[in-house]
Amino acid sequence: MTAHERPLDIPRPEQYRILREADLRDYLAQLPAIASQLGGSPATWSISEVGDGNLNLVFIVRGGAGSIAVKQALPYVRLVGESWPLPLSRSHYEHLALTHQARLAPALVPAVLHHDEALALIAMEFLEPHIIMRKGLVAGTSYPRFVDDITNFLARTLFFSSDLAVPAAEKKDGIAAFAGNHALCKITEDLIFTDPYRVAEQNRWTQPWLDRTAASFRDDLDLHVAISRLKLKFMASPEALIHGDLHTGSIMVTERETRVIDPEFAFYGPMGFDIGAVIANLLMGYLASSGHESSPGDRRAFEAWLLETVERVWTEFARKFVELWRAEAKGDAYPPSLFAGADGAVRLEAERQAYMAKLFGDTVGFAAAKIIRRILGLAHNIDFELIEDPKRRAVCEARSLRLARAMMVESSSFRTTGDVTKAAREMRDWRPDFSG
Ligand code: SR1
Ligand code: MG
């Protein structure tokens, strides 16, 4: 049997049921390790469903001795309803990815306490007092540990699943192990790389202010070429095991800690998709910030931190990734025997720099795609949505769309992170013309 034929231990429909709070209590009560971690009698546990994401149920269970989080996949997209079925197997891939990430970056992901394939359920360490980073950014909070933590996560998870670090056979087994997660990839392929650029029933934007921009994006062939190149890269570049949905809603933070959650979109894809997701969400936080001001300019210091963070996410990631490449290159790519001697070492180092320059280009393109989808596509984010005055929101969104279009189409103007932050700073005070 080849790796591709290996049966996946995915939930069987007849064993699956959607858990209500009372069912979950009974279910957890018969798991000795979990019951003792919660402590006290199951009847006293408080259980509440708190999921505010687009796909799943999330419960917080509090007992006398401790608390846990329980995530259960629904057989459909929660945001839309039963009309949009979605495989439960995403829980299998999430568990696989969490296990992989825990090996490589143990302090940066929640500990898994229990996994039930049949119920598509994962019980995890409850992160407290962590909050979803996106909420913190809307409130104007900066996070001093974030750059170091997220760049450790990115550099280690991406490098150690790439052909630079692992032998070819192991890498291909990895690709095969995640290949079945194609329904989640398809969501990304449609919602990020296709729908915002065409008429699609589920698209929405802040009307009427963005009507003209949305129409122009549907007619813009330069943009259509650029997004199609990115889509192909997403579909056909199994560079590393990527998280696949690394926005600031998938990151939990305190001022001292960072944890990456929710890797259900994981598969072997292009590294720039993950790095771009982080950078896109920081840029959206930046361009949404003026919409959350109580008085003009009162968030300037926070905004400066966000742009500095954009720059440092890339430079620290690149530094750590190249360091790993110099020290831990045990994969089959770039065989050392081809780069022997002083000249070989010089050429290999130059090649590393060229690789990083290309990865930076991918990152900028994917970041732009992630911004556009949050403003013109189905799934929006609270950075903009919580700006109550729709015209004020539209101003922030129009600035973000203009920046993202430039990042995607004028890629030669974005060679460094400084180019990106300079363009974002210029966009911060641009006044869109909504007349006509
Ligand atoms: C229908 S799912 C919409 C979005 O939610 C997830 O968080 C992903 O970002 C996906 O694209
Ligand atoms: Mg998610």
Image: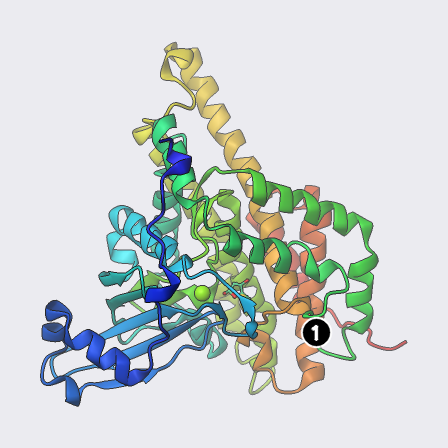
Mark 1: few, some, or many residues within 10 Å (few <14, many ≥20)?
many
The relative height of residue 296 versus residue 418 in the rendered view (above or below) is: below
Identify the residue at image location x=35%, y=72%. 17
Outermost residue on the bottom side: it is 44
Q: Between 70 and 374, which is closer to the camera in this rendering?
A: 70
Instruction: Please tell me how many numbered marks the rendered image carries.
Output: 1
Q: Residue 254 sits in which quadrant? A: bottom left
Q: Position of residue 293 (x, y in %)?
A: 57, 82
Identify the residue at image location x=67%, y=57%. 404
Identify the residue at image location x=53%, y=69%. 303
Identify the residue at image location x=53%, y=61%. 307
The relative height of residue 417 versus residue 215 in the rendered view (above or below) is: above
Q: Is residue 416 left or right of residue 202?
A: left
Q: Is residue 151 left or right of residue 247?
A: left
Tag 1 residue: 205
Q: Position of residue 97 (x, y in %)?
A: 35, 51
Q: Position of residue 190 (x, y in %)?
A: 63, 57
Establish whether ligand 1 lies closer than 8 Å to the Cβ of label 1: no
Q: Between 415 and 252, which is closer to the camera in this rendering?
A: 252
Residue 33 appears in the picture as rendered: yes
Query: Amino acid under label 1?
Result: Trp
The quadrant of the picture occupied by the C terminus is bottom right
